Amino acid sequence: MGGSDGAGNRCVGLDQVSHWFPGTDLLFSRLDATLQTGTITGLCGPSGCGKSTLLKLIAGWERPRRGAVARPGVTTVAWVFQNPHGVARRPAVDHVAFPLLAQGMGRRRADAVARGLMGRFELQPVADRLFSDLSGGEAQRLLLARALACDPDLLLVDEPTAQLDRRSSAAVNRSLRQLASQGAIVVVATHDVETQAVCDSIIDLAAAARRELPATVGTAAPGGRASLAPAARRSPLGASAGLAVTRGVWP
């Protein structure tokens, strides 16, 4: 799993990351954190505070307006979106087998491995059920199983329990812990206090909206440093040479 070879050197570093969109207030300011393999980091805060935006910055899909995001050793990224999407008329097992087939595994072997992965997420009884017939919790766990099949170094999960009942949410939260235990760096955006409870560290974006940036930006907007649990530490990676770094600059 995204973690066997060189896992000890793999991490994501946020170094003084600040972000906003043109014509809008500052989302967050001066975030510092180091996200390690085998851990779950929660991104928390009210709607519109920038949780999904920070996921994009961590993935490298967008550049921060200021600061840097470094991803040494991270070569594969998987993203599980808030609303689980699948192919309605395909069996559930095919959704997990597909990335294995894409990696060159034979069909029979891929099917067997996919069923084994689904078993880790309590999905073996629905392996042959059509995606359209799955419950919301089953569909969400299926996409987490597919993420495991992709063997990611970095897994980003956006509001995985937002539309689930308490029992389904608990199963999804157990699944997140399994993914981390396989060696992935797991980052989850969530409002759910029970999901937050399974995280090793929390970045509170509400706290990151209470400090002013220098007036050189133009109109000063509120911003602040994130609140981090002990597992997330200040990252020196933004200034390091030879790393995969997404760096932002003042506009």
Image (cartoon, rainbow, N blue to C red):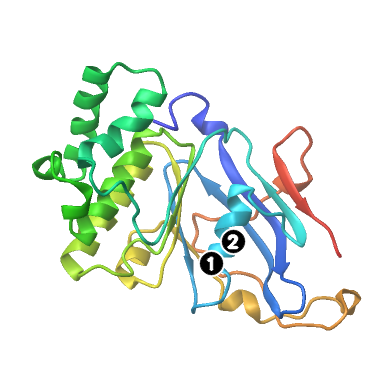
Describe residue 214's horizontal placement relative to residue 153 as left or right. right
Image coordinates for residue 139, horizontal then vertical, percent: 25, 53
Q: Quadrant of the C terminus?
A: bottom right
* Number of other residues with Cα within 10 Å of mark 2, as a class: few under 14, some 14 to 19, many 20 or more: many
Image coordinates for residue 42, horizontal then vertical, percent: 45, 61
Residue tagged 1? 51
Q: Is residue 159 above or below residue 60?
A: below
Element type where label 2 sits in the image: helix
Image coordinates for residue 104, horizontal then vertical, percent: 39, 17
Q: Is residue 226 above or below residue 223?
A: above
Image coordinates for residue 137, horizontal then vertical, percent: 22, 59
* Number of other residues with Cα within 10 Å of mark 1, as a class: few under 14, some 14 to 19, many 20 or more: many
Q: Quadrant of the N terminus?
A: top left
Q: Which disc is residue 219 wearing?
A: none
Residue in view at x 76 percent, y 32 percent = 242
Task: Find residue 20 and report its image quarter.
Answer: bottom right
Q: Residue furthest left?
A: 125
Residue tagged 2? 54
Task: Find residue 228 and report its image quarter.
Answer: bottom right
- Identity of the amino acid at label 2? Leu
Q: Residue furthest front?
A: 89
Residue nearer the viewer, 94 or 57: 94
Q: Is residue 123 above or below residue 75?
A: below
Describe residue 249's horizontal placement relative to residue 53 as left or right. right
Q: Is residue 247 visible?
A: yes
Element type where label 1 sits in the image: helix
Describe residue 40's horizontal placement relative to residue 243 as left or right. left
Evaluate if marks 1 and 2 touch, with contact meaning CB atoms under 8 Å apart: yes
Residue in view at x 33 percent, y 51 percent = 176
- Identity of the amino acid at label 1? Lys
Residue in view at x 35 percent, y 61 percent = 160
